[in-house]
Image (spheres, grey):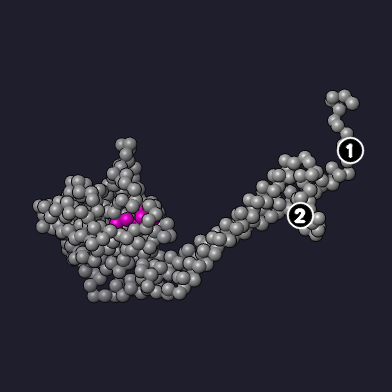
Amino acid sequence: MSASEPPIDPHPQASSDLAHRMQELSLRVDLLDERGAQRHAELETQLRTALLALELIHDDDPGARRRLRLLRAGEHYAEAFIQPEPLVSVVIPTWDRVDTLIERSIPSALSQTHPNIEVIVVGDASPTRVEQAVAAFPDPRVAFHNLTHRGPYDDDHYRSWLASGTPGLNAGVALASGLWIAPLGDDDEFEPNHVELLLDEARKRRLEFVYGRGRVLLPDGRETLLGEFPPRLTQVGLQAAVYHAGLRFMELELGHALFGKPNDWGLVHRMMRVGVRIGMVDQTTVVYHPSLRAQTPSQEGGNEQSATRPVDQQPSRIAELSLRASELERSLDEERALTSDLYRRLEEVRRSRSWRLTAPLRRLRPGRRQT
């Protein structure tokens, strides 16, 4: 036999049978893979649905809608829209950014073209030097309040970052005397006409929450603008907004971090769902300085605000949905492991040229007894 001639197969029938069975197994695995992918998609959809249901129960949208209707029917609701120069409360949660707080944030709040301003700085269990620095600020419109403890924030850094500043903003809003609330970060700054511009739009259109664009100063010196309408994630922020003080019942809490939501977006999204009247002006109202946010999320405490509702209703339903979500996650992991194992077995068959090595797989065929 010449070197160019292929070797003669001494067992042609066995080779044909092996090729046929390998093809059959490949088709079966492809079918299982298709079914597994479909099952994965179903499980992921169910998991997303369960998490959404948990979030809606957590936020208590029906209760918020009822309170919103009561607010609008109340005798003091209209004051925010008809008073000539209503008091606006600027709330600044902080932890330990003394320099930017004193040199940037507070001055930008006090230099507003709208004259009737109060500034409430709330420490997230800030060190003494922060309180001393704010107390020494030469303006009686500035007040400082310190919380007894930080957070508490999640041990996970990302979740901690999503919720940072929540207790401070809550406390500041509760202390506010103004008819309008204007949140501000301790390292950011309002444009001089921030309050006047947004307040004029709110009063003209009877809006309860109005925001503008944010100018972002990037670490490399470039600038970018954020802000779109209708609101969407990353394109709206509390620091670019003012809102009716009657909405303080939509209190910020730590819980939205569990759903992977930044806390300011959590509040705005909830406002959208319950029917708050929202608008936007196409002008820059705030300047963000993200270059100074280099600390880990667990170290930060004064920039972001979270938006959730207390978990004080329907606890059994929440527990039930939490259990269901855990079960779905486990099922999804099992399905993925099964598919991965099937892929591995198929590749072993495809790479093998030995009847001896593929025999164990043939014996596993349904309907064939192992020997």
Residue 105 lies left or right of residue 7; in this view the side is left
Residue type at numbered disc 2: Leu
Front residue of this view, candidates 189 and 252: 252
The residue at the point 88 percent across, 34 percent down is 8
The residue at the point 67 percent across, 51 percent down is 342
> Callout 1 environment at 10 Å: few (<14), some (14 to 19), or many (20+)?
few
Segment colored magenta: 159-166
Q: Is 132 part of what is drawn in magenta?
A: no
> Callout 2 environment at 10 Å: few (<14), some (14 to 19), or many (20+)?
few
Of mark 2 and mark 1, the one earlier in the sequence is: 1
Q: Quick one: quadrant of the C terminus?
A: bottom right
Q: Is 162 part of what is drawn in magenta?
A: yes
Question: Residue 332 location, x and y as percent?
Answer: 57, 58
Q: Mark 2 highlights which residue?
A: 364
Q: How many marks?
A: 2
Q: Quick one: quadrant of the N terminus?
A: top right
Q: Mark 1 highlights which residue?
A: 10
Q: Secondary structure at mark 1?
A: loop
Residue 351 lies left or right of residue 252; in this view the side is right
Residue 45 visible in image: no
Mark 2 vs mark 1, CA separation in Å: 26 Å
The residue at the point 40 percent across, 65 percent down is 273
